[in-house]
Each structure stands twice: as structure tokens, then as C-alpha cells.
Image (cartoon, rainbow, N blue to C red):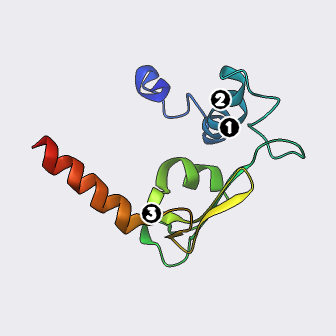
């Protein structure tokens, strides 16, 4: 939004965008002592991104911040670790039955319609 409002693509750097989403976001939530950085004793949410054979991630340059800020998509996430627990590995949800949830949601939609 800042880049658009300022009509300046350099108004906010890509590293600043990621800092806002992590460290600065934890401060806004008043949770900097619990989240926002990878440190012993803090809750850790980590994603592993599959960057292989993805045209929208090519070419891979030395500016990974830009790649993360502008090109990565949720579908590129291969593994998710939430508060130290692996909840998705190789794009497979490990903590609930996806088919069952979809079935339940479909039932709710049918009742609403």
C-alpha cells in the first residue's frame, strides 16, 4: 500500500515487508516475548517452501526477500510446523481428515441453501 500511495516502488523494501510480517507484527500484538523470531523458548511457526520447477519462482536470484514477498504462493508450501508440531508434510495435512472436513462443510452449505 505504501508503494502505491507514494507511487514509488522503492518506498518499502522487501526485507522491511517481511520484518513487518514477523518481528514487527509480534510487537503490534504485544507478543514479542512469545513470537516473531526463532529463539529458544518462543513459539515457532515455520514453513518449508518447495522452490523446484516453479516457473513463477524463476529465476532464483540472491534476493530471496523479493521472491518471498512477491512471488511465493500458499501452494508452494510443502511443510508447515506450528508451535513445534508438524501439521503438514509433503502437502499432506496430518492433524485432521481433510475429506471429512469437506464433507461436513458441504452438509452445512446444503442446510443453509
Comparing 3 with 86, the one in front is 86
Residue at the (57%, 71%) spot, across then down: 50
Q: Is residue 61 visible?
A: no
Q: CA distance from mark 1 to mark 3?
A: 20 Å
The residue that label 3 is drawn on is 75
Work out whether 72 lies above or below 8.
below
Work out whether 46 lies above or below 2.
below
Q: Earlier in the sequence, mark 1 or mark 3?
A: 1
Q: Give x and y (percent) for residue 101.
A: 37, 59
The residue that label 1 is drawn on is 22
Residue at the (46%, 72%) spot, across then down: 54
Labelled disc at residue 98: none
Q: Earlier in the sequence, mark 2 or mark 3?
A: 2
Secondary structure at numbered mark 2: helix
Comparing 55 with 36, the one in front is 36
| Label 3 neighbour load within 10 Å: few <14, some 14-19, many 20+ | few
Work out whether 104 lies above or below 109.
below
Quarter of the image for the N terminus: give it: top left
Secondary structure at numbered mark 1: helix
Work out whether 42 lies above or below 48.
above
Comparing 107 with 62, the one in front is 107
Labelled disc at residue 25: 2
Q: Give x and y (percent) for residue 97.
A: 45, 66
Give the quadrant of residue 36.
Answer: top right
Secondary structure at numbered mark 3: helix
Give the quadrant of residue 94.
Answer: bottom right
Give the quadrant of residue 26.
Answer: top right
**In the visual, does 7 lie left or right of 12?**
left
Q: Give x and y (percent) for residue 61.
A: 62, 63
Q: CA distance from mark 1 to mark 2?
A: 5 Å
Q: Is residue 21 visible?
A: yes
**In the visual, does 107 lie left or right of 73?**
left
Amino acid at each position: 500500500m505504501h508503494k502505491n500511495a507514494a507511487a514509488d516502488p522503492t518506498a518499502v523494501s522487501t526485507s522491511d515487508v517481511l520484518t513487518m510480517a514477523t518481528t514487527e507484527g509480534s510487537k503490534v500484538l504485544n507478543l514479542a516475548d512469545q513470537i516473531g523470531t526463532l529463539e529458544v523458548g518462543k513459539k515457532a511457526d515455520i514453513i518449508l517452501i518447495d522452490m523446484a520447477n516453479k516457473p513463477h519462482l524463476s529465476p532464483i536470484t540472491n534476493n530471496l526477500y523479493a521472491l518471498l514477498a512477491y512471488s511465493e504462493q500458499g501452494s508452494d508450501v510443502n511443510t508447515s510446523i506450528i508451535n513445534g508440531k508438524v501439521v503438514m508434510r509433503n502437502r499432506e495435512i496430518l492433524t485432521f481428515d481433510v475429506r471429512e472436513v469437506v464433507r461436513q462443510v458441504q452438509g452445512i452449505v446444503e442446510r443453509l441453501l
